Image: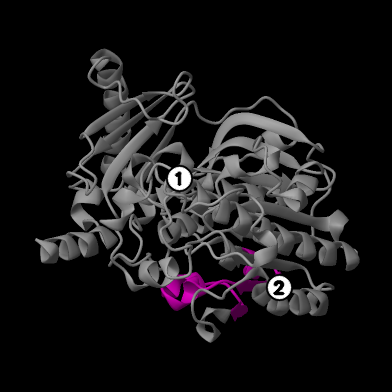
Amino acid sequence: MPRPRNVLLIIVDCLRADHLGCYGYPKETSPSIDTFARTATTFDRFFASAVPTQPSFTTLYTGQFPITHGIVAHKGDRELADDAPWLPTLLRAAGMTTADFCCLPRYKHWFLRGFEFVVDSTTRYEDYGYSAEVLNARAIPWLRHHADEPFFMVIHYWDPHTPYLPPDQYRIFYDGDPSDPALPDTLAPLRSQYFSVMWEKWFKKLPPGLRDAEFLVSLYDGEVRHADDGVGELLTVLSDTGHDDDTMVILLSDHGELFYRHDVFCDHHGLYDGNIRCPFIVRLPGVTGPGRHIRSFAGHQDVAPTVLWAFELGVPEAMEGADLMPMLRGEDHPVRDAVVSEECTWQAKWSLRTDTHKLIVSRIPDLHGNPMRELYDLTSDPDELSNIADTQPGRADTMAEQLEGWIRDMMRKHGLAEDPLLAHGITLGKQWERWNAQRK
């Protein structure tokens, strides 16, 4: 098997897998990513073990489950251990030039580890002007200049993140008047929820009297197309430098996005598939089959060990993720039959997802008033709209036993006395609680 020379890791924040053509979306949101996918291997069931961004990225780089590395919440108060395994550090030690075009090092210091070059352009722009054009204007010259060095390059696109304000040429996914008084007012619940300055500034830029939540979905799709053009430009430059054939290219997201179902409006909390199912597309020349799709479960914790295996580097024992190389080679080698996910940011919840069902268990009541236990039949109800926990208590109990057993085993393994979600406590959800208390 040929050993690659470089790694290009492309991360598109908030990108739902099911809003890409290569995952079956009917709208033309992703022509560049779809073209790339036809040359690569696509994982159809890749799930975030933690949401949102900071715990997800930490899982990606450590190759560990969140219950192990301890970063269970976004903007939490936990620190990553100094001895935690870290993919950028390992690749830098192997002689690769490492570069990160990402804002996360500004928020948490451990995201600096292992990177020789760190570029964060978000500090130069207001109103979320951190567009694909801005990012590529920094990243592409770096790539051209360092293309002759073995490199590990990470680029973190933000376009699909709220607020969705795509340039006019990308506002192509909605017909009609979204403020038509004859339309159902599907945004009514949102008006009583949003409280941040960002939301207020964003809504001032949208059509007055906006009623149709699908208009917001269309803006999100426009931003996906916006990011897709950025990805296409970057991949063209990689080809121009002559490194298509020796670069492992990985495209994924940290999490997805929910638009107006489950009482979540244009945000990335909740353990429904729209938020935890992510794209994961890998091109490894000489290994991956063009246009191949893999149905087996995988997650962010599997990325770091797989990259290390691809480069024939040692995988630290502390990494818990699976080696996906056999599947990338086309072998039938599933690594798990279910996935566990958690959130401790807006709500404190665990989930267990199997081929056919999803169980979500709350540790504390959530801000949406949802039941403490939710069960969904993903075959008949893929949008997870009908909670059957009360009508199928036997299945719910069995899945709860499996989930709680996994949590107990992991707590025992790491000497944890308390469920980490309860030990840490939610973070951003506290803001909503304070805001809601002030209104009463």
The residue lying at 58 percent from left, 63 percent from top is: 159
Looking at the picture, tell me which residue is in the foreground, 245 or 140. Answer: 140
In reply to whether residue 283 is colored magenta, the answer given is: no
Under mark 2, the amino acid is: Asn
Q: Secondary structure at mark 1?
A: helix
Q: Which residues are magenta?
A: 91-120
Tell me where residue 141 appears, x and y as whole percent. Answer: 77, 79
Indicate whether 123 appears above or below 174. Answer: below
Indicate whether 5 appears above or below 283. Answer: below
Mark 1 Cα-neighbour bin, 10 Å: few <14, some 14–19, many ≥20: many
In the rendered image, which quarter is residue 168 located in?
A: bottom right
**Which quarter shows the N terminus?**
top right
**Total marks in image:** 2
Tell me where residue 125 appears, x and y as whole percent. Answer: 54, 82
Q: Is residue 271 left or right of residue 427?
A: right
Under mark 1, the amino acid is: Asn
Mark number for residue 136? Answer: 2
Q: Is residue 363 left or right of residue 120?
A: left
Looking at the picture, tell me which residue is in the foreground, 21 or 273. Answer: 21
Indicate whether 84 appears above or below 1. Answer: below
Q: Residue furthest bottom?
A: 124
